[in-house]
Image (tube, rainbow, N blue to C red):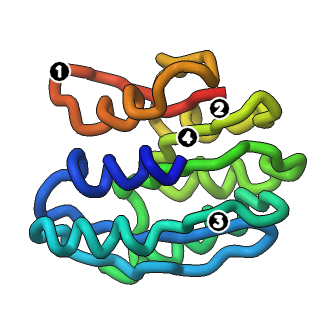
Amino acid sequence: MRQAAEIFLVQILEQDSLAGIVRFDSSAVILQHLTLVSGLAVRTELARKLPTQASGGTNICEGLNKGFEVLREDDQDVAGTEIILLTDGEDSNVGSCLQTAQSSGVTIHTVALGPSADPLLEQFALRTGRDPPLCESHTEPVLTPLSLLTDPGVSSPTQSLS
């Protein structure tokens, strides 16, 4: 997961975008507040701040709430922004924040790696403006959906792997 996120930050994310990083397990913490992606040095620094190992528990709602907090740093409005949610998807309470996510106006791209991802995770993408997943198998490359995020030739990518 880290390698895919690093490649996305360094090679794919559009120049002059704003990016932040939130790490979550049973709780969430901001690793990088919104930062203007203005060159390779900034991209490299963002990639350096990515988590290097997973720790116990998965609380997707905590991660999303902290992501909304980061997005509000720009203009206090999260509508029209995007979150790329990378997770193992093993969260039995993931549905508890689905309505909040849907009404937020944020497009949530989900990338769930592993065989035990909660099927409800796909609903975050579907209900926040994405179409059904292009990749169904956890054996397909993660970079495919991440690269689709910025491919102008693809009209409706979904970033859900399960």
| Mark 4 in CB contact with mark 1 (< 8 angstroms) | no
Query: In the rendered image, which residue does mark 3 sit on?
Result: 63
Amino acid beneath label 2: Glu
- In the image, residue 138 sits, relative to residue 1, either above or below, namely above
Residues under labels 3 and 4: Cα distance?
Answer: 12 Å
Residue occupying image coordinates x 79% and y 49%: 94
Q: Amino acid at mark 3?
A: Gly
Residue sitting at x 20%, y 62%: 17
Badge 1 amino acid = Gly
Q: Which residue is mark 1?
A: 153
Q: Is residue 67 above or below residue 140?
A: below
Residue for badge 4 = 110
Residue 133 is left or right of residue 154, and the answer is right
Q: What's the CA distance linking mark 4 and mark 1?
A: 20 Å
- Disc 4 packing (10 Å; few <14; some 14–19; many ≥20): many
In the picture of the structure, the residue carrying the numbered disc 2 is: 122
Q: Secondary structure at mark 2?
A: helix
**Where residue 64 sits: x, y (%)?**
61, 62
Q: Earlier in the sequence, mark 4 or mark 1?
A: 4
Is label 1 in a helix, a strand or a loop? loop
Q: Estimate the spatial distance between the alpha carbons at disc 2 and disc 1, rounded to whole Å.
A: 23 Å
Residue at 76% of width from left, 65% of height from top? 55
Going from the N terminus, do you reach mark 2 or mark 1 first?
2
Distance from Cα at disc 4 to Cα at disc 2: 7 Å
